[in-house]
């Protein structure tokens, strides 16, 4: 299948669908070691604990996406 056709169709997906597709494509390109996966799990656990203890604040999803889009605008 032609990559240009796939790209055109993919760009018609919703933001969440494109994000999921991008994640799946990236995962297909890289092999993640068990060590790296474990490190990310530890990081996530530490962040959740810090949030629960009030050491860090949460940002709602839509606001986080707006902030990222503004930060990485072309």
Image (cartoon, rainbow, N blue to C red):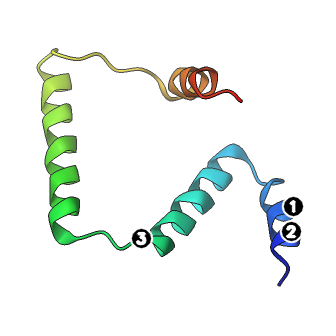
Q: Circle 1 — which element?
A: helix
Residue that badge 3 annotates: 30
Q: Quadrant of residue 62?
A: top right
Residue 5: x and y in percent read: 88, 71
Quarter occupied by the N terminus: bottom right
- The answer for how far apart the CA atoms under marks 3 and 1 are is 24 Å
Residue 18's place in the image compared with 3, above or below, is above
Which of the 4 image quadrants contains residue 12?
bottom right
Q: Is residue 71 above or below residue 9?
A: above
* Number of residues whose C-alpha sits closer than 10 Å to that of mark 2, classed few (under 14), some (14–19) or many (20 or more): few
Q: Nearer the viewer, mark 2 or mark 1?
A: 2
Q: Position of residue 7 (x, y in %)?
A: 80, 63
- 26 or 16: nearer the viewer: 26
Q: Do residues under tags 3 and 1 come within 8 Å of each other at their CB atoms? A: no
Helix, strand or loop at label 3? It is loop
Residue 60's disc is none
Q: Which is nearer the N-term, disc 3 or disc 1?
A: 1
**Disc 1 target residue:** 8
Q: Residue at x 21, y 60 (%)?
A: 36
Dot 1 alpha-carbon crowd within 10 angstroms: few under 14, some 14 to 19, many 20 or more: few
**From what the image shows, is residue 51 above or below residue 48?**
above
Q: Is 21 placed left or right of 52 in the picture?
A: right
CA gap, disc 3 to disc 2? 23 Å
């Amino acid at each position: 299948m032609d990559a240009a056709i796939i790209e055109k169709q993919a760009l018609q997906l919703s933001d969440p669908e494109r994000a999921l597709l991008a994640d799946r494509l990236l995962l297909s390109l890289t092999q993640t070691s068990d060590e790296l996966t474990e490190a990310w799990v530890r990081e996530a656990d530490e962040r959740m604990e810090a949030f629960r203890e009030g050491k860090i604040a949460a940002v709602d999803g839509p606001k986080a996406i707006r902030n990222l889009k503004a930060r990485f605008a072309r």
